[in-house]
Image (cartoon, rainbow, N blue to C red):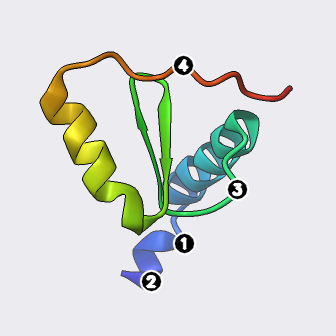
Amino acid sequence: MLEQAKQDEIEQIYAQSTNTAIEMGIFGAPAYFYDGEYFWGQDRIELLEDALKSGRPGFKHVYPG
């Protein structure tokens, strides 16, 4: 698995994901987004689950930048 992680394709995906996270203002992991709504931390997974089950639209955050 460590050898696979060193492949150029994987490193490019990692770099792009990191840049996207920075652009979105993510400051920690894990971070989840549902329809623009941000759930940060494993202890918020139940709130994300409730949002998914409810069918309500996500709260639209305004991201810095």
In the figure, residue 61 lies in which quadrant? Answer: top right
Circle 3 sits on which residue?
27
CA gap, disc 1 to disc 2? 7 Å
Q: In what element is the residue under mark 2?
A: helix
Q: Nearer the viewer, residue 26 or 50?
A: 50
| Gap in angstroms between the C-alphas marked 2 and 4 | 37 Å
Whole-number angstrom distance, CA of label 4 to CA of label 3: 18 Å
Extreme residue toward the right, this view: 65
Q: Which mark is residue 6?
A: 1
Q: Are marks 1 and 4 in contact (CB under 8 Å)?
A: no
What's the distance in space between the residues labelled 2 and 3, CA to CA? 25 Å
Q: Position of residue 13 (x, y in %)?
A: 54, 48
Of residues 5 and 44, the one drawn nearer to the viewer in this rendering: 44
At 74% from the left and 44% from the top, the residue drawn is: 22
Give coordinates of residue 27: x percent, y percent.
70, 56
- Secondary structure under badge 4? loop
Between disc 1 and disc 3, the foreground one is 3
Mark earlier in primary sequence (2, 3): 2
Is there CB contact under 8 Å for labels 2 and 3? no
Residue that numbered label 2 is attached to = 2
Callout 1–callout 2 Cβ contact below 8 Å: yes
Disc 1 marks a residue whose amino acid type is Lys
Q: Which mark is residue 60?
A: 4
Counting residues from the N terminus, which is met first, the one under dot 1 or under dot 3?
1
Marks 2/4 in contact by CB < 8 Å: the verdict is: no
Residue 26 horizontal/vertical position (percent): 66, 48
